[in-house]
Amino acid sequence: MQTDSKIKKVLVIGLDCADPHLMFTRYYDQLPNIKKLTERGLFGPMESSMPPITVPAWSCMAASKDPGQFGVYGFRNRADWSYDKLTIATSLAIKEPRIWDILSSAGKKSFTLGVPGTFPPKPIRGWSIGCFLTPSIDSNYTYPPELKDDIAKNFGEYHIDAKGFRTDKKDWLLKEIYTMTEQRFDMAAHYMQKCDWDFFWMVDMSVDRIHHAFWQFADPNHHRYVKGNPYENAIVDLYKYIDGKIGELLNLVDLDETAIWLVSDHGAKCMKGGVCFNDWLIREGYLTLTTQPTQPTRFADVQIDWSKTRAWGEGGYYGRCFFNVQGREPNGQVSQKDYDKFADELTERLTSMVDHEGKPMGTKVYRPNKIYRKVNGTPPDLIVLFGNLDWRSVGTVGNPTHFTFENDTGPDDANHNFHGIYVCAAPGMSKTGRQEITLYDFAPTVLTQMGLPVPSDMIGKNILD
Ligand SMILES: [Zn+2]
């Protein structure tokens, strides 16, 4: 632990989905402020949580705890063992203390701005502005509540997210993304100067939105890429714009006494298409419907014969597989004693799956009780990464084939990748250069920088040790 730390404050700039290959290799020379920051400290890829999904990844970073400990396995989670109750994981689902809670107890003031997992806002010593899961600006999305009026007075409508980012209206979306990003950084600059904070953490969602919406235009490996298309530079242009905004924020702090972090929750990769998980389970004999739909239909809208169903799947950037277990689900079919055998069988079938051209997909399958320290809530029985995240999971049934190249929730060309980014630049750092860390290392390192002990149950370690 640093005993004579010069660090008085910590500023964290979060960029959802910022990717290490793009930031530190492909676009590195076009990002002067970020490059300068990397030269002052440690930087590199930061391994995400499993799964590498916004919810729960930011909370894993903030608490140094895993998704199983939270009982939060994605945006939507089963509320119980019934077949149809799914709930969105808000801040209320996170019971473990996150860094701002620990700092509050230690008498330090935090400001969190748009950090995923902070709606509804909970009381902290300091200020909190709700994340992209804020349902509308009519909700109580700030702590303290009157902060909302101050935002309205200074910035008008708070741009919670780029609305409807899975759209074909690309020019409209670009404007929407820049409007949000400009405001998010302006709000950060405003409150960084106005409030007396020890720890300031802002997150901007624009990089994630532009990856999902514009990847096909920038990546020659994408099947829809056309050289010389008008959006070829959309992604790099946003990285450059954000680099400028980061430069402006850094001008507002005293770098001789402020530790700066740049972080993302996961990276991005080209998405080949989607695997129609439930259609595949039907073909393989694990799932039975009472009537087969003739066009793609939401899983919630079809009748399932649970007496002839052993497993079903959920859509998303990764697939979740649920077993229909005797004594657990209402009409369970897999016996408790066959559970492990059944899990092994399905894992074998999934990992040997071939793609639309008959080539091995490299699908990875994980069991929550093997990868998490605890398994709280209602976990999936299998976590399925189709093609190791080259493919997403499609939940609808009645698709013409088991592979689709259109997304069931609107155009989307990128999937998440296993590593996000980090830069840690602080006064008095003895170590510099590239070093890979995990997002679980973030909170222990920041606590150490702030002169506080690291709770023994945190997963990660101080990277400066
Ligand atoms: Zn994310």
Image (cartoon, rainbow, N blue to C red):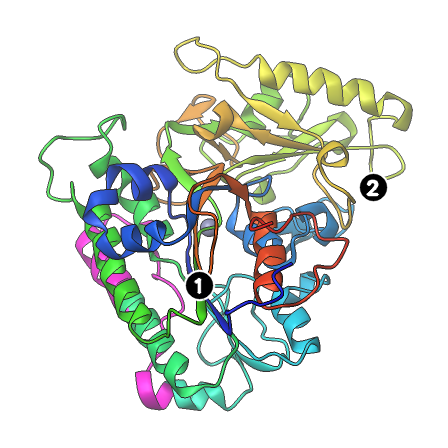
Q: Residues within 10 Å of mark 2 (few under 14, many from 20)?
A: few
Please tell me which of labels 1 and 2 falls first in the chain.
Answer: 2
In terms of depth relative to the viewer, which is nearer, 43 or 411?
43
Q: Position of residue 211 (x, y in %)?
A: 32, 45
Q: Magenta includes 154?
A: yes
Question: Is residue 351 left or right of 184 when viewed as pictured?
Answer: right
Q: Which label number is shown at residue 427?
A: 1
- Write down the residue under mark 2: 330
At x 75%, y 25%, the residue is 308
Is the residue 299 above or below the residue 148 in the image?
above
Q: Secondary structure at mark 2?
A: loop
At x 60%, y 39%, the residue is 50
Q: Position of residue 298 (x, y in %)?
A: 52, 41
In terms of depth relative to the viewer, which is nearer, 364 or 456?
456
Magenta region? 152-179
Question: Is residue 235 left or right of 405 when viewed as pictured?
Answer: left
In terms of depth relative to the viewer, which is nearer, 137 or 291?
137
| Residue 411 visible here | no
Badge 2 amino acid: Pro
| Residue 95 visible here | yes
* Quarter-of-image position of residue 120: bottom right
Question: Is residue 295 left or right of 61 when viewed as pictured?
Answer: left
Q: Residues within 10 Å of mark 1 (few under 14, many from 20)?
A: some
Q: Secondary structure at mark 1?
A: loop
